[in-house]
Amino acid sequence: MPDLHELKTEADRRWQGLVNGSKPWIRVGTAMCGHAAGAYDTLAAIRETLQSLGVDAEVDEVGCLGICYAEPLVDVTLPGGSRLFFRNVEPADSSEIIATYVVKGEVPDEKALGYLGERRIRGVPNLADLPGIRLQQRVALRNAGNIAFDDIYQYLANDGYGGLNKALFEMEPPDVIKEITDSGLRGRGGAAFPTGIKWSFLVGSPGPPKYILCNCEEGDPGAYNDKGILESDPFTLIEGMTIAGYATHSTNGFVFIRHGHDGPIDRTRRAIEQAYELGLLGENILGSGFSFDMEVALTGESYVSGEETALMDAIEGKRAQPRPRPPFPAASGVWGKPSNINNVKTLSYAPEIISRGAEWFSSIGVNRSTGTAIACLNGKIKYPGLYEVPMGMTLGEVINDVGGGVPDGKKLKLLQTGGPLGGVLGADSLNIHIDFDEMRAAGAIFGSGGIIVADEEACAVDLTRVLVAFCQYESCGKCFPCRLGMEHLLEIVERIARCESRPGDMELMQKVGTTMEAGSLCGHGQLGFGPIRSAFAHFQADFRAHIEDGRCPTGSCDAPMISPINTRPYAWDYAPATAPPS
């Protein structure tokens, strides 16, 4: 069995062959943002052009560099030259890029976005100076857009598995948990619970088996950072889950991914296969005596599957519904065995924290929100993208400096943060910092990282009814405060949107929301009134226009909203994960 030194030696040899070899190395971003922009057509055209011109080049698919607005993004490294990025490359552009730059070394100015490396290119800015790159601080996404998602040697060549190797051979399991605790890492799935403390709950539980579960349900509209990690660098998650398994004496890991998300599913499965092939998963990892197995578990589409106990039911092949607690998962989780659940982002930080130390990670961020945040900027924003920025940056800095602000000379009106259960904030909230506690105090949450930007043409009432309709549609119906409460909230807010409100509607929604908060089984119902509360706090004028003046100030509510038809398959339509023998 090779040790990590042998694996890294081979990885470095291969990497140098790509970076400093005799062939051009072309990387095409094919994560979901690139895919949606036509990256696979561009990739096919590049390969066809290379063949027709007789050019021998290495071609790799990579993930997202964060600047989704530039997709399809093509990254070309010439032998002995600098690295040059081309933006919004359509199939018709590929022949010019290959013939002009790859063959002749001349830069086609129109599509050139930026260069990296010591060799400057006249007329082209340094990519590192672009705000969408310069203001990022990439930890979980450190390899995204740089390495091929299906080549574990590229991950190893970029310091991959250094954290696991250090944990296995230089640290005892309690030391690993202490390092994670001291780093201040908090869960990035929405609840922001301290990760090290959560891991420690599992340590004392009897096993085997004991399970590390990773949540990539990610059904929030406007959030795609978990899927972005798995499509760009699934190896960092695998390493992080293995570290968590070692720290908690766990035996098995399951990566829960929503059925139909083929990119993350296929890429994670291939990465797991490669980890097994090199002895980085399975029996006696790296000769350490520690064994850990991992697989991908699929279920049907269900937003409530993101709740940790509902996720366990989904993995078992049941309908995804939250369980009452106690018992908590650390005592009785999936198949009744001790389990720990974190989301993709949380686990993906673990390798760098162990490798570089708790003090390094805690030096990033602010207050009790250490490290970085991965923000998905959507909506009326000039540069939509997937940006990893330091905790403590203000919303205004993220929107205006990183995302370029609202386009077309329009004014920012509102932000919707933290998914459909998050908050609706006004333009006066731009000084709020990305800080779990500060955002909660402001009536919002950072949640899964989605930030939807709306300009002055949006109506807060219209947005609120869309959010409430989503939450009502996705309620699992198990507990009546959520099941009935969501229906009542939607009925009332739809009435207000139609300018047909009744006296006392706002007070009635407050009563329903309070009941939901107190009586619902999980966060879906407990947080269901949040969007209405925050929207009314920041946009009373919009609500008054509908209630008192009988009009929508922007006309957005004039068209009736049509609720989606439930065509989704249920969880039991898919084979459940296989429970290992007790």
Image: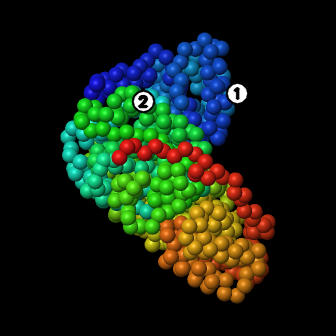
Q: Nearer the viewer, residue 323 or 6?
A: 323
* Residue 175 at least partly seen: yes
Residue at the (53%, 61%) spot, across then down: 321
Answer left or right for 27 relative to 282.
right
Mark 1–mark 2 CB contact (< 8 Å): no
Residue at the (24%, 36%) spot, across then down: 289
The disc, 1 or 2, on the residue closer to the chain's N-terminal end is 1
- Image quadrant occupied by the N terminus: top left
The residue labelled by disc 2 is 274
Q: Which mark is residue 337?
A: none
Q: Nearer the viewer, residue 127 or 346?
A: 346
Q: Nearer the viewer, residue 536 or 326?
A: 326
The residue labelled by disc 1 is 92
* Type of amino acid under label 1: Ala
Q: Residue furthest top?
A: 54
Q: Residue furthest right?
A: 559
* Type of amino acid under label 2: Gln
| 389 in relation to 91, above or below | below
Residue at the (62%, 74%) spot, across then down: 484
Residue at the (46%, 59%) spot, across then down: 309
Residue 237 pos. (x, y %): 41, 43
Residue 21 pos. (x, y %): 43, 17
Q: CA distance from mark 1 to mark 2?
A: 35 Å
* Residue 113 at least partly seen: no
Neighbour tally class for label 2: few under 14, some 14-19, many 20 plus, Cα within 10 Å: some
Q: Nearer the viewer, mark 1 or mark 2?
A: 2
